[in-house]
Image (cartoon, helix red, strand yellow):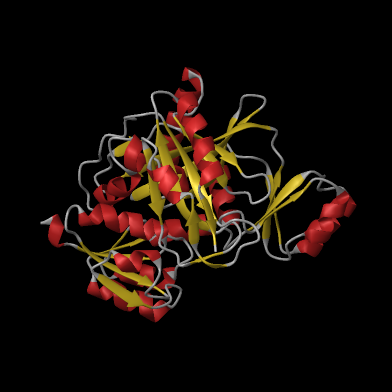
Amino acid sequence: MFVNTRIGILGGGQLGKMLLQAASRWDLNTWVMDKEFDFPAGKVTNQFIKGDFTDEELVYQLGKHVDIVTIEIENVNTSALHKLEEEGKEIYPQPSIIDTIKDKGLQKEFYRSHDLPTSDFKLYEDAQAIRKAVEEGSLTIPFVQKARTEGYDGRGVHIVRVEDDLEKLLDVKSVVEHMVPIDREIAVIGAKNPSGDIAIYPPVEMRFHPTANLVEELISPAGITPDQLSTINGLAHDVLKSFDIVGLLAIELFIAKDGSILINEVAPRPHNSGHHSIEGNMTSQYEQHLRAILDLPLGNTAITSPAVMINILGEPGYSGEAYYEGLETCLAMDNVHIHLYGKSHTKPFRKMGHVTILAEDVESARQKAREVRKTLKCKC
């Protein structure tokens, strides 16, 4: 019976914590690996294994003790996962898919080879190669530079708008993308189980912090046209089938000013763009991921209430033991759902939690979200 299945999770951050909270409702047997016991997931798992999930031997040994291995972060040792898969272990998402997605260059080439719409791009070895391309005229400003690996939460991205920005190029293997004139940024989460069933969540709109490049406000449902909704749903199905992934896939999209819809990038795991689903949808993204990897019927993704999600970020100028100013005031507000991740120390723009606000309509939720943002501060 699936409740006796041992599930190993690589990564003990906030995504792992919320995945485990969903797993606890079914009394699932969960094992988590990460570097420190005081990481968010350490408080809610059956077994916490202190170890580096980029270490081949440690990941392999975890896999030998569980029935299914999954992830909450892409930067894991996939050599061990390939070996475990060859030995018959269930690894979801599949190691080959993790390899492709965690390298943004391979990810972009995947879209190109599968005729999936994405922005124009070129691959470069380092900053010098990018500067040379600009000098020779084969690359024109403006553009976006992305580190091929280990970029997350706004890290590993550099926008070149003017020539002076070339001085701050990241000196790493990079994807350089044409800067698309963006009307809005959309995310859609899909899930697929081994039986081939697919479920797609209603798209959400993401609005980003102007300097930290982190989601500042997530709006559900997205304010898009029926034609755009149809195109996005069709594209999500195509992407899930092309990867043939088992588990969740979060798909970030651009709606360009010319009306075209382009894939920005994807994540093969629960994602910041799906936090609202805990309160705002019939099935949370975390429960859906468990349903998918256990080959259970996928849950209903319908919206139960308009919602706005905001991240609780560490305040600029504060580094130290976390203190939440205005917490009691926000707890007194109706339909304000606060999630604190349990990170003991804050620093500027660190994700410390999130808040989901429900209301009868999006604008009412946005108005209350502005009140929460002004009131709830993570300081030290």
| Closer-to-camera residue (227/100) | 227
Is residue 188 toward the left or the right of residue 211 in the image?
left
Task: Quadrant for residue 357, please give it.
Answer: top left
| Residue 115 makes an appearance in the image | no
Count of numbered tags: 0
| Closer-to-camera residue (138/255) | 255
Q: Residue furthest bottom?
A: 57
Residue 334 % position (x, y) = 36, 35
Q: Residue at x 46, y 48 (%)?
A: 272
Residue 290 % position (x, y) = 27, 51
Q: Residue furthest top?
A: 226
Q: Residue at x 19, y 59 (%)?
A: 28
Residue 321 % position (x, y) = 51, 68
| Residue 41 makes an appearance in the image | yes
Task: Specify the quadrant that holds the C terminus.
Answer: bottom right
Q: Residue at x 23, y 68 (%)?
A: 46
Is residue 30 toward the left or the right of residue 374 in the image?
left
Q: Residue furthest right?
A: 135
Task: Quadrant for residue 52, please give it.
Answer: bottom left
Residue 76 % position (x, y) = 45, 68
| Closer-to-camera residue (152/176) | 152
Task: Specify the quadrant that holds the N terminus.
Answer: bottom left
